Image (spheres, rainbow, N blue to C red):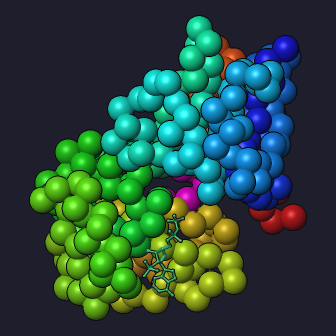
């Protein structure tokens, strides 16, 4: 029986075991997906000696995505481009890894808002942390000509932009309103709007009617940003879908079946988030 774990610190809040448990049951696979808290001081050793732990693979969450990447024998294109890995597996004794956050973000938009990429001239991304890099990578890969990256701390946006090259334009937070009319896609990757955090307070009225607004925050599911966009008649995509879609490639890799993100899975996680 294959055993897979979510690794990170802390990991108790992770919904990954619920997601993979749902798919294991759905497909009648005898496998196990559990939690493994890895304290930061043990992380480098844990991933370097991954083959000794008896797991077929693992997911990696904060704060170990860079450490896990550094331990890989082989990494996929996205992981190499971003320097972080969130999905690991063993192949012929080698530790292999991928970054599925970027494709998860794109797959979620494809599934939730078909045609969202009809106009790939400009996307506006808010926030310059780890999630922002995955989102920007996905948008550029999909063919966006320009990504305007706005962040409260301009230096962080500049550092991210430098990583991606001239298609990413770093700007300060005060310039967001000026770019709204250009963007057909708006993505929030900041923690604003998350439960316990201040809301992302933006006047969206300058956005075009065709614009799609997406949030990586999923607690609550409907953030103040998404609520405002909906009230204006815009299409919205919540952050839960990204979490579910990023899990698909790992499950397929470990258990040999490509699962789908269906309504039952979504309902299960929504119920758990409410509890
Ligand atoms: P992650 O890796 O999950 O994306 P992170 O690295 O902590 O998270 O980044 C959080 C993002 O939310 C950053 O872009 C941060 O802006 P700064 O770089 O200026 O810190 C943004 N953020 C958090 N609180 C904010 C606030 N009150 N106003 C504006 N941006 C905020």
**Whole-percent x, y for residue 265 in the image:** 72, 41
- The quadrant of the picture occupied by the C terminus is bottom right
Query: Which residue corresponds to the image point at 17% horizontal and 56% vertical from the top-left?
Result: 165
Query: Which residue corresponds to the image point at 68% horizontal and 78% vertical from the top-left?
Result: 195
Asked whether, in this view, residue 152 is left or right of residue 164, the answer is right
- The quadrant of the picture occupied by the N terminus is top right
Magenta region: 236-242
Asked whether, in this view, residue 167 is left or right of residue 226, the answer is left
Is 49 rendered above or below residue 201? above
Query: Which residue corresponds to the image point at 76% horizontal and 54% vertical from the top-left?
Result: 39
Q: Residue furthest top?
A: 92
Is 244 rendered above or below residue 88? below
Residue 249, quarter of picture: top right
Between residue 190 and residue 89, name the one nearer to us.
Answer: 89
Residue 263 can be seen, yes or no? no
Between residue 42 and residue 257, name the one nearer to us.
Answer: 42
Asked whether, in this view, residue 190 is left or right of residue 179, the answer is right
Is 18 rendered above or below residue 12? above
Between residue 57 and residue 111, name the one nearer to us.
Answer: 57
Residue 13, quarter of picture: bottom right
**Whole-percent x, y for residue 257 in the image:** 64, 17
State yes or no: residue 167 in magenta: no
Residue 88 can be seen, yes or no? yes
State yes or no: residue 238 in magenta: yes
Asked whether, in this view, residue 177 is left or right of residue 43, the answer is left
**Whole-percent x, y for residue 121 in the image:** 14, 58
Tag count: 0
């Amino acid at each position: 029986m294959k055993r897979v774990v979510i690794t990170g610190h802390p990991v108790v809040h992770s919904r990954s075991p619920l997601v993979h448990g749902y798919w294991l049951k759905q497909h009648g696979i005898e496998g196990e997906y559990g939690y493994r808290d890895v304290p930061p001081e043990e992380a480098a050793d844990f991933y370097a000696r991954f083959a000794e732990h008896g797991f077929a693979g693992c997911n990696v969450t904060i704060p170990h995505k860079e450490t896990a990447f550094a331990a890989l024998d082989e990494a996929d294109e996205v992981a190499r481009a971003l320097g972080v890995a969130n999905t690991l597996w063993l192949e012929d004794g080698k530790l292999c890894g991928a970054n599925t956050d970027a494709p998860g973000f794109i797959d979620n938009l494809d599934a939730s808002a078909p045609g969202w990429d009809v106009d790939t001239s400009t996307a506006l991304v808010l926030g310059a942390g780890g999630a922002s890099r995955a989102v920007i990578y996905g948008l550029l890969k999909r063919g966006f000509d320009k990504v305007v990256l706005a962040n409260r701390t301009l230096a962080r946006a500049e550092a991210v932009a430098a990583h991606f090259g001239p298609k990413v334009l770093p700007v300060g937070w005060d310039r967001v309103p000026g770019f709204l009319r250009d963007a057909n896609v708006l993505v929030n990757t900041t923690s604003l709007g998350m439960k316990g955090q201040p809301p992302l307070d933006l006047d969206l009225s300058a956005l075009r009617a065709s614009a799609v607004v997406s949030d990586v925050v999923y607690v609550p599911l409907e953030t103040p940003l998404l609520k405002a966009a909906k009230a204006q008649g815009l299409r919205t995509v919540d952050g839960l879908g990204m979490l579910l879609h990023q899990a698909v490639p790992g499950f397929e890799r470990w258990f040999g079946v490509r699962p789908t993100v269906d309504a039952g899975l979504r309902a299960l996680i929504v119920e758990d988030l409410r509890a």
